Image (spheres, rainbow, N blue to C red):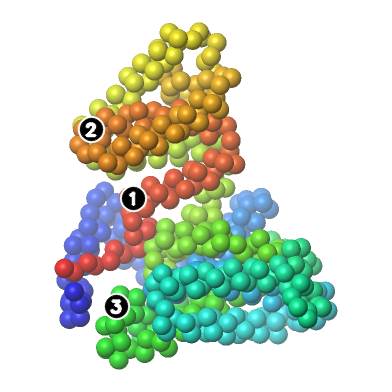
Amino acid sequence: MSHIGVDRWVAESEDREEQYSGWTAPARRLIDKVPSGWRLGVFLGVVALYPFLVKPAGVRIGITVLLLALLALGLNVVVGWAGLLDLGYVAFYGFGAYFYAIVSSDQIGLHWPTWVAIPVVVAATAVLGALLSLPSRRLVGDYLAIMTLFFTQVFVEIVVNFERLPGVETDLTGGPNGIPGVAPWVLFGFEFNTFNRNFYLLLFLLVLLIVGLRNIDDSRTGRAWRALREDTLAAEHMTTPVNRLKMLAFVVGAAIAGLTGTIFASVQVGVFPNNFLLTFLITIYAALILGGLGSIPGVVLGAIAVAFTPEILRNPGVAGWLFYLGLVVLLVVVLKRWVRIVSVLAGLVAFGYLVRGLALSIWDQSILGTANDTFVSRMVDGWVLVLGDHQNIVSNYAFVLAVAFLLGVIATKGWWKAALLIPTVYLGILVWENKLALQPSVTRQLLFGGVLVVMMAVRPQGILGTRRVEIT
């Protein structure tokens, strides 16, 4: 059904009422009353203190967060505002990084000054974005995604195999070895050659980009992009220049990605093909979706969450807290009623003692191990089976059973769902205590994915995103 002529303010009235409900409503009202400029100033002041509070390794993580925030803001223009599913975005990032590395290193001996290299790189990336946008005149949705995904794969293959191309004698991209020795930014005689200096450079560019995008969002172009996202056909019937807007979205997003790529190359002092794989594109999309499509502060917050969460999970104690907190949130989301939640928790402990008793009746006490030395792990010690020498074998079987029970939970309703949750949660805890807590590198990625899944289940529109209005 067409949405033309529908009063969106009336359609969103229920969402606005829900926004200021619950125990956090007073805080949300207070925050919303603060002007956006003041909120940006507070954010800038807090983040500016970060390098003084952490070690150099922490500053490096902060640089990663800011780079991801810049990239997510650029992708938000294409996906969040214009509604174009662009899977070639990371290629623009790589193009900007490689272009800057080529003209500012010993690779071919150019050594352009920064004030020349940056505008040229950004302009060239924007032109590349305009060229990639041409098929979007006819392709939409999945077809556009496949085409742009192909563009990313082509870019990676070119930078890896450039010196092998027919008729090419110059090693322009360095092949699999990349380009080392990239020069840092030098502006007005000031060299950005330390982590702290690059951190503040990125912070300045982030604030500048936020202000610029906020003005674009409030402009006719921003409103036209949102109209294009909601209903392309309706926007075209209202004389909106659809094709030109698609091209402009690609150009703006590509230019932001290219600029970010130049800083990345200078901070890393080199560029390599594995920096621009699809896994990193997934990370950018995770920040965008977690924060909320179309929301500038949400995208920044999503980038902070996505970049910082894996680092936080390096600490086994923190990882344990997040794992058990995730289980509690899962129970609340699935069961909703407190009677069922309490019943499942009581049944979980009883089921644990039963399994432990059966295990000890079959084998002797020597099979048991000790729980991990964290507070949350000690809480389950005594009723969760923690093994010694057979941890891996039992954990593998328990993982398969947990997946099977989880499918049963999804397929059932009512008290049957609650009953199946008991062995499902128990097996999850058993796998955690016997295997995952002992393998931080693997567990970090699994827990990070789990946090995203729980977050999307609780708030599908993202942290600060707005639910789409469905009118029937």
Residue depicted at x 33% and y 25%: 348
Q: Which mark is residue 416?
A: 2
Q: Report the residue marked by disc 3.
A: 231
Above or below residue 376? Residue 33 is below
Q: Report the residue marked by disc 1.
A: 457
Q: Please report whichever mark, 3 or 1, sits nearer to the chain's N-terminal start.
A: 3
Q: Which mark is residue 352?
A: none
Callout 1, which amino acid?
Ala
Is disc 1 surrounded by few (<14), some (14 to 19) or many (20+) residues within 10 Å? some
Q: CA distance from mark 1 to mark 2?
A: 21 Å
Callout 3, which amino acid?
Asp
Q: Position of residue 193 (x, y in %)?
A: 74, 66
Residue depicted at x 33% and y 54%: 459
**Residue 239 shown left or right of residue 100 in the figure:** left
Q: CA distance from mark 2 to mark 3?
A: 42 Å
* The residue positioned farthest toward the front in the image shown: 166
**Residue 404 shown left or right of residue 376 in the figure:** left
Q: Please report whichever mark, 1 or 2, sits nearer to the chain's N-terminal start.
A: 2
Q: Position of residue 261 (x, y in %)?
A: 63, 71
The one of 406 and 58 positioned closer to us in this rendering: 406
Q: Position of residue 106 (x, y in %)?
A: 82, 74
Above or below residue 314? Residue 250 is below
* Displayed quadrant of residue 242: bottom left
The one of 430 and 166 positioned closer to us in this rendering: 166
**Residue 333 shown left or right of residue 12 in the figure:** right
Callout 3–callout 1 Cβ contact below 8 Å: no
**Number of marks:** 3
**Residue 53 shown left or right of residue 272 in the figure:** left
Is disc 3 surrounded by few (<14), some (14 to 19) or many (20+) residues within 10 Å? some
